[in-house]
Image: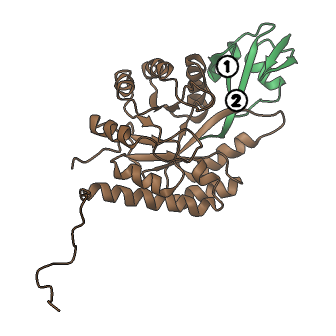
Chain colours: A brown, B green
Amino acid sequence: MAARTRDFYGVEPRSRLMLGTARYPSPKILSEAIRRSGCEVVTVSLRREARGERWGEDFWGMIRELGVRVLPNTAGCHSVREAVTTAQMAREVFGTDWIKLEVIGDADTLQPDVFGLVEAARILTDDGFKVFPYTTEDLVVAERLLEAGCKVLMPWGAPIGTGKGLNNVYGLRALRAHFPEVPLVVDAGLGLPSHAAAAMELGYDAVLLNTAVALAGDPVAMARGFALAVEAGRLAFEADPMAPRDMAEPSTPVIGLASL
Amino acid sequence: MRLIVNGEAREVEAATLDEALDELGYGGRVVATALNGVFAPARKRAETALRDGDRLEILTPMQGG
């Protein structure tokens, strides 16, 4: 089994779990969930702030204290122009050339506009960005994103925030097989640690999730659960799982069976 | 002049982006700016002239997924 890479533009985080920072019950719980999970990469965004409020700066100060690497997103952008401008603003504020590139094509499913995604990826990589594109499992789109300069791909498991897990295991497996050397991250749609383990068992290099942890009754415990599942799934992949078979086969030796 | 700041009409005396941020209460804050949909880098704010009707976006770090 070929060793997969977790080289994300020269960075090799020890943990293969990446977490979003939105929708937690409180900043304290967010901070504790990140620490307990051991994750080293978290996603952040840029938004307008109501006059007189300083929550944005407090949030940014808290993230910096945690010492994790940030992956700013372009969430909510529906056009190439919006995504490119947001990425440029994020690079300045967060001091990183990493960008989780989202160009949303459909408001209901939050499905990526893969045509705009490829175009924006090309513009941003030409401008020195290290692009993490939020994409589908489509092989041809993946090929175009790599041609545009992406060195990581982030196919969805299911639509953002649905918690449905891996909607298209066949497609994700095909993507893994087609690009054995490209770092692949399942991003979005995971609801349970078992979903994350399944992604890792397919040979994915990492998973990125937010809502499944943030909206759990106990986000800190769920963050830990995901961390363990990611580790278990990865170990299983590296251990080369057995092939399933249709017929039963005794695991206890037949030879030496007593005749009673 | 009249600017559209984060979607709201605001009257400002400022002639440059740098001055406008001060006047609007964002002086010294961690913000990124875009003028009429185009990124306006911090290092160029002092020389970025504003015109009546300009659309200014002022964004701050926020939680994200």
Quarter of the rendering containing residue A232: bottom left
Q: Name the side, left or right, on which B9 lies relative to A204.
A: right
Near mark 2 (Cα within 10 A), the count class, few <14, some 14-19 or many ≥20, is: many
Indicate the secondary structure of the residue bearing disc 1. Answer: strand
- Marks 2 and 1, Cα distance to the nearest angstrom? 9 Å
**Which x, y percent locates residue B30?**
69, 34
Tell me, yes or no, whether the two marked residues, 2 and 1, touch with CB atoms within 8 Å. yes
Residue A167, compared with residue B35, is above or below; it is below
Residue at (35, 29) in percent of width and height: A139
Q: Could you tell me if residue A10 is visible in this image?
A: no
Extreme residue in the bottom direction: A260
Q: Is residue A76 left or right of residue A136?
A: right
- Residue marked by disc 2: B59
Q: Looking at numbered disc 1 in the image, what kind of residue is underneath it?
A: Ala
- Where is residue A56 drawn, in percent x and y? 71, 40
**What residue does disc 1 label?**
B34
